[in-house]
Amino acid sequence: MRGALATVQAPRAAVRLTLTAGSGGRGLDRPALPAPRLFATASPSVAPDRPARLVLARVRRNDGSPASRIKSLSYLDNVLARAEAQAAGADEAVMLNTRGELACAAAANLFWVSEGRLWTPALDCGALAGIARGALMAAAQAAGVEVAVARSGPEALERAEAVFLTNSLIGLRPVAAFGARGFDPHPLAERLAAGI
């Protein structure tokens, strides 16, 4: 069309900011005078195009570690859990903590719908206080949906009406199956997806 501006959609990308205390030399000791470094990387990021299939990982989330409360580069347990899920033909792993309670997915926060409430693992279960997690909880409360934190085993997911995952890259991703338990699309997940 003459005179019309063409709309071009930029490719989707993931930007990662990493802050370190700087080089400390060999060993575990930190430098006496840290020289912080901040760097950024960007890479293409494709949004999921279908609901996730979950399996329960054997790898546990160390809820007693201070690293479980922060987004860090100490991610080996999550990498192993995700590899376990992929080897089983699933998209993502559900991780339990050292007490056998639901903690998170390998790279996402975990939510489920039961008894008219939105549930998520308590932070002291080893869940990360993710940005999308907080946004979803706020969107649910604004919509009049009760949000509850839980210290529950995996049976909570087996009894749930719906399960979904959140993180800053996927937004809200519905879950189609947890092991042998299947889930239909749920109106609450669709309603809340727009809020994050």
Image (cartoon, helix red, strand yellow):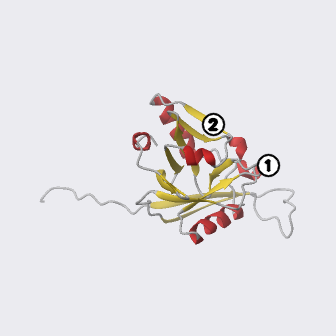
Going by the image, does 74 lie left or right of 183?
Answer: right
Residue 22 drawn above or below residue 159: below
Q: Give the labeled residue for mark 1.
A: 64
Along the line of sight, the residue nearer the viewer: 89 or 125: 89
Name the residue type under label 2: Val
Where residue 89 appears, as percent x and y from the top left, is 53, 69
Q: Position of residue 26 (x, y in %)?
A: 85, 70
Q: Tell me the quarter of the image containing the N terminus.
A: bottom left
Of the numbered discs 2 and 1, the one sitting upstream in the chain is 1
Q: Is 125 above or below relative to 39?
A: above
Residue 29 tag number: none
- Location of residue 81 with respect to 130 vertically, above or below: below
Q: Residue at x 46, y 61 (%)?
A: 13
Can you identify the residue that label 2 sits on? 149
139 on left or right of 65: left
Q: Secondary structure at mark 1?
A: loop
Q: Nearer the viewer, mark 2 or mark 1?
A: 2
Q: CA distance from mark 2 to mark 1?
A: 18 Å
Q: Nearer the viewer, residue 158 or 84?
A: 158
> Toward which corner of the image does residue 186 lie, by quadrant?
top left
Q: Secondary structure at mark 2?
A: strand
Q: Amino acid at mark 1?
A: Gly
Q: Are marks 2 and 1 in contact (CB under 8 Å)?
A: no
User: Which of these two is toward me, 6 or 121?
Assistant: 121
Q: Residue at x 83, y 56 (%)?
A: 33
Q: Residues within 10 Å of mark 2 (few under 14, many from 20)?
A: few
